[in-house]
């Protein structure tokens, strides 16, 4: 009996010590996060915030704007007029969704400005007739091919208000002419965190209000419920994308035609086989000169040991068959660029494979896996952004560090018969 009592006291004592250690560790972890991420949660109010431009329909004749307010707002509207024109201001009534929130209540409003003129600058503001945002500007796409560029950002995910904000600022000064921004997933670390989404919107505000954004979910936009992926409750109210995706996956997989480029945004988190049929149809019907695919998980990994088998099995054969030009990816928190590998592990080249890129725009960095044979170039420079430009038969790709160093650059040209050539613009015998 005495032995049993002693054993019981020992178990209780050890459990209590473990509890103390665990509590201390958690507190230390919280302390660290507090040091890195300034808590900037702001409750919604009468004045609009979290304003972001996206496309639901043709970029040459329409523009969608979404914003947030408190539930007090009853008459959400957006005003628009062309710059340098005597046309009257047009008012569009918004569609509103309520967000289940930690706050007293949040509304997201969206207006799709339609019947716009191609290649035209507009100014707009959002509000309720009394409380307004500032006036902002955007430009519609041309309805025929002309030179343009866009920005591609890998995972943002961490330290959004501090570190990631520097990447946004760098894109703004390096490529102010860029027409839109592609976000490759893992915008935040905790999908349901009001604070992290607030930080993402605050850090990006300067470009969110003036350029259009294509955003796809990464694994960090999903939680798990009863074993199944559950998309963050913030996604649908705060983003409005084309409803041309596969059934059941609209808003998280879609395609956008911008002048002579088709950008296909896929959800690589799940339903890979189910999206393949839709993907093939979108590739088969494509009449644009350039084709870009964006997905969060890399087909060929840059930092992990294993490549993504399901993407290699169901999507890669379509990328090769329909001669996709670029596959832009994230998730691996490092940088790598190169062609694909055959099923035998042999290297592919420019006319048999897209150029695959893995990149990162936030501060969380993984070591690249040096065993991986596919990359032509890698980098451990940390936070990066890419500026991708098109001019007639030429695609110009440049990758910059957050401090403006050019770490990768190449030119892809395409002949009339579709034959491609790649020209490296930086020496390849070094690893940045
Ligand atoms: Fe990820
Ligand atoms: Fe990530």
Image (cartoon, helix red, strand yellow):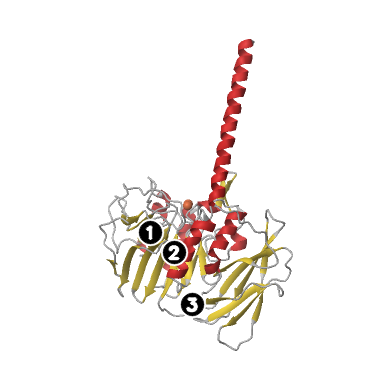
Residue indicated by mark 2 = 152
Asked whether the residues under the numbered discs 3 and 1 touch, taking CB atoms below 8 Å apart as contact, a structural biologist would say no
Horizontal relation, residue 109 to residue 222: left or right: right
Q: Is residue 281 visible?
A: no
Q: Which mark is residue 212?
A: none
Residue 177 placement: quadrant: bottom left
* Sequence order check, earlier mark of 3 and 1: 3
Residue 209 placement: quadrant: bottom right
Horizontal relation, residue 41 to residue 327: left or right: right
Residue 87 coordinates in the image, percent (x, y): 61, 87
- Viewer-proximal residue, 119 or 33? 33
Q: Residue at x 64, y 83 (%)?
A: 89
Residue 357 coordinates in the image, percent (x, y): 38, 59
- Most extreme residue toward the top is 1
In the rendered image, which quarter contains the N terminus?
top right
SS for callout 1 = strand
Q: CA distance from mark 2 to mark 1?
A: 10 Å
SS for callout 2 = strand
* Sequence order check, earlier mark of 2 and 3: 3
Q: Is residue 397 visible?
A: yes
Q: Residue at x 52, y 70 (%)?
A: 212
Residue 16 coordinates in the image, percent (x, y): 61, 27
Residue indicated by mark 1 = 357
* Sequence order check, earlier mark of 2 and 1: 2
Residue indicated by mark 3 = 141
- How packed mark 3 is, by other alpha carbons closer than 10 Å (few <14, some 14-19, many 20 or more), is many
Q: Does 173 appear above or below 366?
A: below
- Viewer-proximal residue, 274 or 17? 17
């Amino acid at each position: 009996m005495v032995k049993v009592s002693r054993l019981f006291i020992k178990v209780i004592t050890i459990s209590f010590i473990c509890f103390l250690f665990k509590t201390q560790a958690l507190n230390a972890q919280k302390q660290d996060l507090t040091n890195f991420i300034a808590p900037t949660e702001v409750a919604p109010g009468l004045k609009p915030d979290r304003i972001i431009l996206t496309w639901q329909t043709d970029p040459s004749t329409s523009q969608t704007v979404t914003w947030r307010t408190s539930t007090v707002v009853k008459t959400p509207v957006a005003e628009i007029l062309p710059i340098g024109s005597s046309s009257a201001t047009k008012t569009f009534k918004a569609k509103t969704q309520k967000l289940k929130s930690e706050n007293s209540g949040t509304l997201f409003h969206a207006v799709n400005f339609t019947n716009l003129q191609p290649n035209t600058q507009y100014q707009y503001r959002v509000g309720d007739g009394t409380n307004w945002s500032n006036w902002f500007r955007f430009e519609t796409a041309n309805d025929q091919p002309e030179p343009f560029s866009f920005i591609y950002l890998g995972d943002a995910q961490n330290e959004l208000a501090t570190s990631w904000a520097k990447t946004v600022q760098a894109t703004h000064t390096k490529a102010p002419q860029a027409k839109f921004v592609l976000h490759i997933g893992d915008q935040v670390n905790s999908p349901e965190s009001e604070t992290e989404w607030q930080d993402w919107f605050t850090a990006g505000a300067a470009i969110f209000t003036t350029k259009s954004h294509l955003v796809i979910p990464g694994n960090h936009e999903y939680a798990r419920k009863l074993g199944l992926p559950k998309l963050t409750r913030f996604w649908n109210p705060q983003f409005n994308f084309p409803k041309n995706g596969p059934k059941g996956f609209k808003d998280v997989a879609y395609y956008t035609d911008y002048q002579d480029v088709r950008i296909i945004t896929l959800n690589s988190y799940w339903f890979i086989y189910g999206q393949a049929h839709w993907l093939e149809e979108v590739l088969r019907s494509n009449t644009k000169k350039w084709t870009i695919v964006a997905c969060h998980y890399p087909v060929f990994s840059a930092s992990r040991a294993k490549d993504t088998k399901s993407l290699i099995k169901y999507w890669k054969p379509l990328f090769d068959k329909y001669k996709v030009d670029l596959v832009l990816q994230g998730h691996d928190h490092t940088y790598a660029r190169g062609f694909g590998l055959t099923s035998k592990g042999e290297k592919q080249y420019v006319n048999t494979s897209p150029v695959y890129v893995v990149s990162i725009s936030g501060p969380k960095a993984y070591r690249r896996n040096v065993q991986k044979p596919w990359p032509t170039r890698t980098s451990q420079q940390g936070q990066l952004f890419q500026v991708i430009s098109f001019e007639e038969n030429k695609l110009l790709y440049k990758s910059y560090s957050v401090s403006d160093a050019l770490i990768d650059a190449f030119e892809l040209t395409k002949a009339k018969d579709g034959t491609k050539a790649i020209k490296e613009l930086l020496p390849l015998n070094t690893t940045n």
